[in-house]
Image: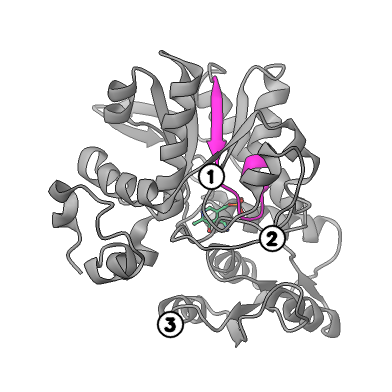
Amino acid sequence: MFRQALVQQTRGFTTSNVAVDGFTGSVGNTPLIYLKTLSEQTGCKIYGKAEFQNPGGSIKDRAAVGIIQDAEEKGRIKPGGTIVEGTAGNTGIGLAHVCRAKGYKCVIFMPDTQSQEKIDLLRMLGAEVYPVPAVPYENPLNYNHQAKEYAEKLENAVWTDQFDNTANTYAHYISTGPEIWEQTQGDIDGFVCGTGTGGTLAGVGKYLKEKNNGKTQIWLADPPGSVLYQYVTSGGNLPERTGSSITEGIGQGRVTANLGTFVNELSGALHIPDEKSISMLYQLLDTEGLYVGASSALNVVAAVELAQKLGKGSKVVTILCDGAYRYQSRLFSKKWLESKGLGNAIPESLMKYAVL
Ligand code: PMP
């Protein structure tokens, strides 16, 4: 599934000398990017795993491949079957790609607050899309519950249940984690990222901890509107969920099965306000030439803070989850930034990038 390509450096380019097997074979084996400016500024080594290079454009391609593979192995889906998921974004896009490549039907339930671009993209990828009222998880009309019920009524259909189906974490345990271990040659002091389902954090974190007897510290990065920072730092109190963030795709109101008991193995958590994330997003573009989404920028802020905690010379890895393309009408619009109270968060010298 996640085939190891032989790679070599040629005049600054990385080349691979094996062909891979279709869409699913081209998921993974993403570069680990050394973030030069931030590393020099901190005297540490900061790396970002370029998950925006996956063929469906995000970290969630790995979960999509892993979850569908697991359903096939368990006999939960047969040729010609239907994959059903409740998702507002990257998971649906990953699943829609894998469904096309494997000949499954794909049905996506999403809150009706989502952008037309996302609905259009999913439909272009062949998915059937049902926008439903944007109501909380406790409400039976929530998109997740509707997806589950829809799958239960259909023959040869699976609700992939990305939040609580641990095939998601396992995909990262067998692919993202080992890749980071190899790319750092096991010399890694810290790993930090935000969580939506928790699959990336728990899968990578478990693998790295097992490989080097817990030497690598694993930290959670949490945006406003998520409860996990407080949960971790208060020793297990789950507060009410309030507030919101511009970092789409991360933030959580509960401990999902994918995060599970791994939440107790974290070394700590960092709360990252939107002001810092949006400023880093523009800085990454300006100094590294990287055009990444807000969750990636939040992750990099957290990686810098963790490296500073761990001390000079420390090596810290995080995830660059996806590109900015899916959010550019917001993240590069002055008006939108001002509407979120972020008009002054970006240094004046970088506002030239806010062209929309
Ligand atoms: N960033 C983005 C943009 C995402 O879409 C997601 C998935 N919702 C994540 C980060 C978090 O990944 P995970 O679900 O593995 O916690």
**Going 65% across and 17% down the picture, which residue do you hit?**
215
**Going 48% across and 60% down the picture, which residue do you hit?**
245
Q: Position of residue 231 (x, y in %)?
A: 70, 45
Residue at numbered disc 1: 28
Circles 1 and 2 in contact, beta carbons < 8 Å: no
**Going 79% across and 60% down the picture, which residue do you hit?**
71
Q: Nearer the viewer, mark 2 or mark 3?
A: 2
- Please tell me which residue lies in front, 134 or 124: 134
Of the numbered discs 2 and 3, the one sitting upstream in the chain is 3
Q: How many residues crowd around disc 1 within 10 Å: few (fewer than 14), some, or many (20 or more)?
A: many
Spatial separation of the CA atoms under disc 2 and disc 3: 30 Å
Residue at numbered disc 3: 116
The disc at residue 240 is 2
Of the numbered discs 1 and 3, the one sitting upstream in the chain is 1
Pick the quarter of the image with the C terminus.
bottom left
60 sits to left or right of 237: left
> The magenta stretch spans which residues?
189-202
Colouring used for the render: one colour
Q: Position of residue 122 (x, y in %)?
A: 51, 76
